[in-house]
Image: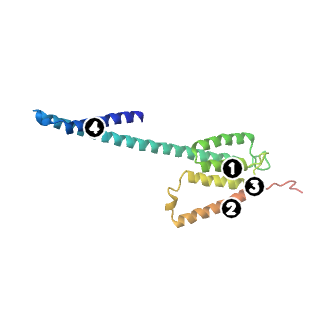
Amino acid sequence: QRQYKIWGSVIVLFYVVCFGFLKIHDFQVWTLAPFIESLIGVFMGAGAIAVITGIILIFQSSIQAEQEKKQEVFTQKLKLYKKIIDQLQQAFIVQDNEEISTITKREKLELFFTQLNIALLSKPKTFKSFSNLINGFAEENGSLKEDASKLLLQFVIDARDDLEVQDDKEKMTNQDKEYLADAIKIAKKQANRVTAYQKTVFNDIDD
């Protein structure tokens, strides 16, 4: 950017000097005046075309770089969010050596580093939602809390907004908004059922 400013200033100064020379100098006292005057005009016209072309190319490359950056960030976000869902799926499933769903210290550590990736890539709302999730979905002993599924669902909803799955919410039809609201309600009911299933423990079932 500094080099662009320097060269831009040099080009502007050159054109100011040339225009000033054409305005002030009286070419009528010189035999070659028409030739020199037309020659300067040709050079200035070519220079103007070059400057305009350079500005267009710089602007285009800047837009392209920004689009590539957004695409790469989107790709990394999508991979990260899918990885989080897979990670927490293992925590919700009751393992062979468990009576109820629990999360190990190793899994908590992995989620902490996942949180750092969230802080790096995601919007503040999604970062907060994931922080609430990992800080509030399990007890100290690792057993899942009753609202664990709700916290996970809320994070997924915020992640969906972060990915801008719906390009422009304002352009959503009323029918689309109703579908989305109904889908969220159904998902919340299912989340309650998942937690209920996971918290059901039978002791001395024979008796």
- Tag 1: residue type? Leu
Q: Could one spot residue 125 in this view of the protein?
A: yes
Q: CA distance from mark 2 to mark 4?
A: 72 Å
Q: Which residue is mark 2?
A: 189
Q: CA distance from mark 2 to mark 3?
A: 13 Å
Please report whichever mark, 1 or 2, sits nearer to the chain's N-terminal start: 1
Q: Viewer-proximal residue, 27 or 49?
A: 27
Res 115 → quadrant: top right
- Across and down, in percent, residue 72 comes to 51, 43
Please report whichever mark, 2 or 3, sits nearer to the chain's N-terminal start: 3
Q: Nearer the viewer, mark 4 or mark 3?
A: 4
Please report whichever mark, 2 or 4, sits nearer to the chain's N-terminal start: 4
Q: Which residue is mark 1?
A: 133
Res 201 → quadrant: bottom right
Please report whichever mark, 4 or 3, sits nearer to the chain's N-terminal start: 4
- Across and down, in percent, residue 111 comes to 68, 43
In the picture, the disc for residue 16 is 4
Instruction: Locate the C terminus and report the quarter of the image it occupies.
Output: bottom right
